[in-house]
């Protein structure tokens, strides 16, 4: 029979082993990407596990093969505009669903949540036809439109709005604010952590979006970073060192956004109002 | 200052009526407290006066003007909420001046008003702090300050002291009373705390099930309750009630037998002349009305004692099992299990009919 202390020690070791394994699984792809970016294509194929000396060659190769400023501009424009629009539309909808409850609105909300169960692959063809008829194929608007009214984000904002004190809204009404002013001057600042968390999630999804831009963006001058890296990787003789340098560069903006807003992200996930 | 008049005010959520026709006349400068058990409609009534809940039917007048459909900000009211409802992203100064800034007052004027309210409430050193940097009492003072700067005709308080600890509650209660004396503005205050109601109010409105049970000064309600509910609700510990039967009526003097208390009887004078022998009644005696002397007496066994220092509450039982609460000055000499004879002056006993209505 093991003593309580030994059981606690074994349990602690098992927990840390599991945590270590999961951490390794999370960190390994990033480490492999960073190592690969410093190695030649042959070394990457051979699975060389250590840093090499081909970083500058790979960077030069990437900048030679890709119009980096244009691709970054395309990607950033789509990511920032669609994130701002998603946040504006979803938070307004979430606020509305929570503050103005009625049976009909509840049914609409439930119906909207059902759309979360439809896989994007099932929507691609109808969406493509709609965009084609609207004359939007090969435009950035076509990339943004399907994502800006996100059922998940409306759900997220509605859940967060439940923690928004109704007395603040009452106090604002007594102070003379109209509903839109309460939303703009009270709700938005009070819920800023919720917005920060939503910003990170939507920005990352938008920045890394691949499938839908692949379908609607057809000319090189409209393409985003994920499409460009994908086309580099699918060349007849892909240079994996260059591809991984591109991947590292493409990761930097999302990393930057995350680290800048990390504190608000955690607060937002826990709830803005305490 | 404004008077507030409610005429047949009703509120319904679908088919559920929660305020069932309230008539009330609040005079200018009066401090009126709404009390009642949870769900009686006191907060709903206050919110209807504020304009935060719609009035289903009836008329609300503030300062002689019908206000049913007027925006809350234009009713000349200011409201203090239970949770303070301070804007967390603004400083104390910004919170207090927000409504004025929003109404378009010049910055200098807003600053002046805020400074004046801060002086009254001693908030000067806190003006640049955010609400989360304040204690509960300070937050409540800011909430009151925010109301003061609006110079309202009517102050509305929705259980403003419920979130404070006992000591701070006493302190803030005194501050609110002082504020009323200084500003002499009409104040309507919702609470479930009897001490707040009794100490602050010029007039108490007791509500139950969306109806007004009685309106009167604190001592009127205490000494002369209109019915069993008010008698039981006002006063702590609550009034003792005993079932009785009228056994004799003689020239305005009524004898009531208390069968559950070993046939003890109470003899009291009434104005009512239509009461008949055999009528079932309820006899009410307040715990503090039990004394060392008195012609009515109950034999009781002490179940539990609550020593409060100055006085003691004895929870005692009669042979039938009925619990009787007695307030006594001699509690230190008593112990659980003691048998006592509790006496009271029958003239202090109140009689109620089977419907709970007071028989006077």
Image (tube, coloured by chain):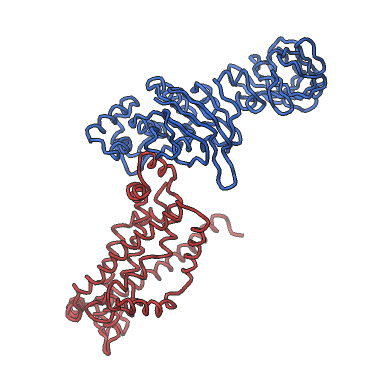
Question: Given the current orientation, which residue lies at the most extreme bottom position?
Answer: A236
Q: Chain B in the picture: what colour? A: blue
In depth, the one of A71 and A17 nearer the eye is A71
Residue B327: quarter of image: top right
**Residue B301 location (% of width, % of height):** 75, 22
- Left or right of A109: which side holds A69? left
Q: Residue at x 39, y 69 (%)?
A: A26
Q: Chain A in the picture: what colour? A: red
Q: Residue at x 29, y 40 (%)?
A: B102
In depth, the one of B32 and B344 nearer the eye is B32
User: Measured along the vertical axis of the image, is residue A235 above or below residue A126?
Assistant: below
**Residue A17 location (% of width, % of height):** 46, 66
Q: Residue at x 41, y 78 (%)?
A: A126
- Left or right of A137: which side holds B274? right
Q: Residue at x 34, y 32 (%)?
A: B150
**Residue B2 location (% of width, % of height):** 41, 26
User: Measured along the vertical axis of the image, is residue A192 above or below residue B158?
Assistant: below
Q: How many circles with numbers are drawn on the protein?
A: 0
Q: Quadrant of the N terminus of chain A?
A: bottom right
In depth, the one of B336 and B37 nearer the eye is B37
**Residue A256 location (% of width, % of height):** 27, 62
Residue A129: quarter of image: bottom left
Residue A171: quarter of image: top left
């Amino acid at each position: 029979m093991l003593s309580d202390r030994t059981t606690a020690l074994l349990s602690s070791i098992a927990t840390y082993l599991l945590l270590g394994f999961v951490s390794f699984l999370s960190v390994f792809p990033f480490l492999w990407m960073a190592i690969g970016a410093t190695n030649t294509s042959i070394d990457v194929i051979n699975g060389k596990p250590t840093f090499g000396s081909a970083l500058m060659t790979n960077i030069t190769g990437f900048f030679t093969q890709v119009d980096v400023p244009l691709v970054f501009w395309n990607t950033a424009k789509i990511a920032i505009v669609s994130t701002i629009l998603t946040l504006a539309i979803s938070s307004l909808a979430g606020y509305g669903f929570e503050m103005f409850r009625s049976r009909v609105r509840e049914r609409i909300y439930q119906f909207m949540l059902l759309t979360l169960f439809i896989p994007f692959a099932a929507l691609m063809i109808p969406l493509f036809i709609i965009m084609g008829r609207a004359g939007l194929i090969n435009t950035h608007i076509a990339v943004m439109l399907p994502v800006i009214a996100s059922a998940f984000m409306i759900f997220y904002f509605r859940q967060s709005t439940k923690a928004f004190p109704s007395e603040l809204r009452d106090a604002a009404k007594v102070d003379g604010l109209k509903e839109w002013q309460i939303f703009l001057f009270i709700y938005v600042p009070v819920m800023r952590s919720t917005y920060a968390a939503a910003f990170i999630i939507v920005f990352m999804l938008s920045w890394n979006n691949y499938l839908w831009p692949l379908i609607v963006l057809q000319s090189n001058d409209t393409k985003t970073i994920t499409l460009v890296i994908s086309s580099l990787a699918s060349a007849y003789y892909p240079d994996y060192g260059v591809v991984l340098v591109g991947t590292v560069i493409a990761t930097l903006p999302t990393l930057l956004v995350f680290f800048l807003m990390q504190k608000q992200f955690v607060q937002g996930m826990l709830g803005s109002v305490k | 200052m404004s008077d507030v008049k409610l005429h047949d005010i009703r509120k319904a959520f679908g088919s559920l009526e929660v305020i069932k026709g309230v008539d009330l006349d609040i005079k200018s400068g009066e401090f009126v407290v709404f009390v009642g058990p949870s769900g009686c409609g006191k907060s709903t009534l206050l919110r209807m006066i504020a304009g935060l809940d719609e009035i289903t039917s009836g008329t609300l007048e503030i300062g002689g003007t019908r206000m049913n459909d007027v925006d809350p900000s234009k009713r000349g009211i200011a409201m203090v909420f239970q949770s303070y409802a301070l804007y967390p992203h603004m400083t104390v100064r910004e919170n207090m001046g927000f409504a004025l800034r929003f109404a378009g007052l010049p910055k200098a004027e807003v600053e002046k008003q805020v400074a004046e309210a801060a002086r009254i409430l001693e908030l000067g050193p806190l003006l640049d702090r955010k609400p989360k940097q304040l204690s509960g009492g300070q937050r409540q003072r800011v909430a009151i300050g925010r109301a003061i700067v609006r110079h309202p005709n009517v102050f509305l308080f929705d259980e403003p002291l419920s979130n404070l600890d006992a000591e701070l509650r006493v302190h803030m209660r005194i501050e609110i009373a002082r504020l009323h004396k200084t500003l002499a503005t009409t104040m309507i205050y919702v609470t479930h705390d009897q001490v707040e109601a009794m100490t602050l109010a010029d007039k108490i409105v007791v509500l139950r099930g969306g109806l007004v049970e009685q309106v009167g000064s604190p001592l009127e309600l205490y000494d002369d309750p209109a019915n069993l509910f008010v008698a039981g609700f006002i006063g702590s510990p609550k009034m003792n009630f005993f079932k009785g039967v009228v056994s004799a009526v003689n020239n305005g003097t009524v004898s009531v037998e208390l069968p559950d208390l070993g046939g003890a009887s109470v003899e009291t004078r009434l104005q009512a002349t239509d009461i008949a022998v055999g009528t079932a009644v309820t006899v009410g005696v307040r715990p503090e009305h039990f004394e060392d002397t008195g012609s009515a007496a109950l034999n009781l066994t002490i179940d539990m004692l609550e020593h409060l220092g100055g006085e003691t509450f004895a929870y005692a039982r009669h042979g039938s099992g009925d619990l009787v609460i007695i307030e006594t000055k001699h509690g230190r000499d008593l112990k659980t299990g003691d048998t006592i004879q509790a006496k009271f002056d029958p003239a202090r006993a109140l009689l109620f009919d089977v419907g709970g209505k007071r028989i006077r």
